[in-house]
Amino acid sequence: MNVELSRRAFLQTAGAGLAGTTLGAFGFADIEAAHAAAIRPFKLATTVETRNTCPYCSVACGIIMYSKGDLRKGEKAEITHIEGDTDHPTNRGTLCPKGSALLGFVKSPTRLQHPLIRKPGSDKFEPIGWEEALDRIARLMKDDRDKNFVARNNDGVTVNRWITTGFLAASASTNETAFATYKVVRSAGMLVFDNQARV
Ligand code: SF4
């Protein structure tokens, strides 16, 4: 949304703000709310909206992230504000204290942003590229499954299970992602599977 705030509009808004606050003191809270709604777009002017899901817990509230800089135009984007998505059926725009603090989570200097590997025998983690990390994970999973997959138990009953590798999925998954995750994991015979959202 692009909104130009002229000096004239600013003075009108400031005047309305004073009137709104005074009226609020007399119990006209709706007027204050309307005033706040009128002011709010200025904060978000020229930002790009991106819908996402709060990553903290299995409630999976919808959020809108506002960023400066348009990736589609080759610009570098920086998130400046995050709030609840009023169109989302789960939370209708509300967020708990953790979700309300998401901007701090995104900008935390201790946030892990790249895969790390601790090689066999090593006592430290080292950076690894995404492609290399995913290839390595797939390779190790395949090798482990080939070696340890159990098609039948000792009684000859078909069990098709793979219990030497486990899978932990994220709570930020949407229903569709959770469905696909469940299908992949269970189709591979994996029994050790958990998710904060208990998919
Ligand atoms: S906003 Fe709170 S309740 Fe909603 S998903 Fe995030 S942590 Fe869970």
Image (cartoon, rainbow, N blue to C red):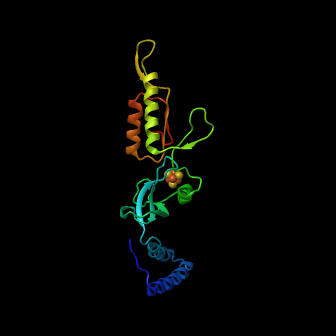
* Relative depth, front residue between 86 and 65: 65
Q: Which residue lies furthest to the top in this view?
A: 155
Q: Tell me: residue 146, above or below residue 50.
A: above
The image shows residue 133 at horizontal and vertical percentages of 47, 40
For image coordinates 48% across by 86% down, the residue present is 11
Query: Who's the residue at 46% across and 48% down the image?
Result: 172
Residue 115, position in %: x, y? 51, 45
User: In the displayed structure, does residue 124 sit left or right of residue 149?
Assistant: right
Viewer-proximal residue, 101 or 46? Answer: 46
Residue 24, percent from left and from top: 54, 78
The N terminus lies in quadrant: bottom left
Q: How many labels does the image show?
A: 0
**Residue 147 or residue 177, whichever sits in front:** 147
Snapshot quadrant of residue 72: bottom left
Left or right: where 36 falls relative to 176: right
* Up-down relation of residue 131 to residue 157 (above or below): below
The quarter of the picture where the C terminus appears is top left
**What residue lies at 51% left-to-right and 43% top-to-bottom?**
128
- Taking 88 as reference, is 128 above or below it? above
Outermost residue, right direction? 123
Pinpoint residue 139: horizontal percent, then vertical percent.
Answer: 44, 32
